[in-house]
Amino acid sequence: MKGEPVALKDSFLKHVAQTSPFSHAFPVARAEGCRLWDTDGKQYLDFVAGIAVTNVGHCHPEVVEAVCRQAHLYAHTMVYGEHVQEPQVQLAEAIARVAPEGMDCTYFLTTGAEANDAALKLAVKLTGRSWIVAFHKAYHGDTLGALACFGEERFRHSFEALLKPVDFLPFGDFDALERITAEHAAVLVEPVQGEAGIRLPPPNWLVALRERCDQTGAMLIFDEVQTGFGRLGEWFAAGEWAGATPDVMTVAKGMGAGMPLAGVIAPRDMLWRFAADPPFSHITTFGGHPVSCAAGLAAMKVIEREGLLARARECGDYLRDHLRDIAAADDQLVDVRGAGQMTGVEFASEKRAREVVTAAMAEGLLLETNLMAEDVVRFSPPLTATRAECDEAIEKFAKALKS
Ligand code: PLP
């Protein structure tokens, strides 16, 4: 390498493109379970989990083993859909076993945004309509299709010339559902809005949304990129948790246990439409990467064997109960909400939330705010987090509040 050696952080700031002017530039050295170490050897409890990605914890030995085994066999042989690759087949079978009835087929992709784009394309193809409904403060990713559904104008406006117009409705509003019509190809919704600050829909709202889609023929797409693969203490929000099953679910994040992997899950007859009129309607080189699928399959086995769905429910409730006790004695803490291991703690101001995230980091606890709710601090630990680890997080959080 040419030039003087520079510190890792300086080099990061110089050579790696940033996504904001205020990057933490956190120098990560290694990670295991719910813990991360920085390059100075300081240990952190990771209650962000790559934003709801490392559901079975960092470097779970079974995931690491599956990744290494598959990398030795083959990493890539042919664009997805042409070669029969065992890890894909096994993962698709495993998903079909736990997904709501009839959702028996997975179209593998790499990122959540790409999965949402594919689902929207499918809806347009199947319905012959073109209008889409999304919700205020929705986040579905940053490709052009997903970006068009971004529920906050400031994130769209620089690119508006490239985007299809979308009808935005208020999330959780029953009356607004009347504005879904037979002109709409699809309604794209997060069962729990993540980047909006962990906003849960009111009871039965998703049921009413399902009914309205049935009346109008609009396809219902659940974006389960954050909620899927156990985050809410169920495999998916779709089904029992929501009280409704969509036509299509999109998934990513926790699916690959830290490896890049996403999918559109739907009945096979529906997904088959990608293969016709024209064939190859949605193709991608790395979708369903065999190493990622091997990791995803190993993670599903871990979730089942270690009872992580139940643990996410129990430890999530436990965490929120304690955070509510803390909130009761702190007038800057406005609300604690969530489900499973998806929790939001709302502060009276963005400034206070940011101060607390910074103070928590100094205490050795990683937390984050949300893209469209910087006054809300999110707790999204691995589903492996135990009560003892939750206690540790609560203690560090309480100390951070005092600083
Ligand atoms: N949908 C939701 C609900 C998300 O939270 C995200 C990412 O945070 C995405 C889609 C985009 O996923 P990706 O970053 O993999 O494109």
Image (cartoon, rainbow, N blue to C red):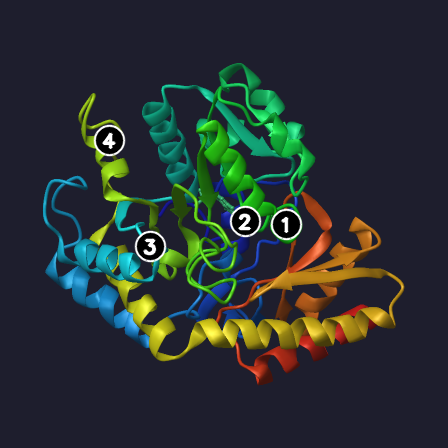
Is residue 42 at least partly visible in the picture? no
As helix, strand or loop, the secondary structure at mark 2 comes to loop
Distance between mark 4 and mark 3 Cα atoms: 20 Å
Labels 3 & 2 near each other (Cβ < 8 A): no
Query: Mark 4 vs mark 2: which is more N-terminal?
Result: 2
Label drawn at residue 101? 3
Q: Which residue is mark 2?
A: 191
As helix, strand or loop, the secondary structure at mark 3 comes to loop
Query: Mark 2 vs mark 1: which is more N-terminal?
Result: 2
Under mark 1, the amino acid is Pro
Could you tell me residue 124's position as x and y percent?
38, 24
What residue is at 44 percent from the left and 39 percent from the top?
221
Q: Nearer the viewer, mark 4 or mark 3?
A: 3
Query: Mark 3 vs mark 2: which is more N-terminal?
Result: 3
Labels 2 & 1 near each other (Cβ < 8 A): yes
Under mark 2, the amino acid is Pro
Label drawn at residue 201? 1
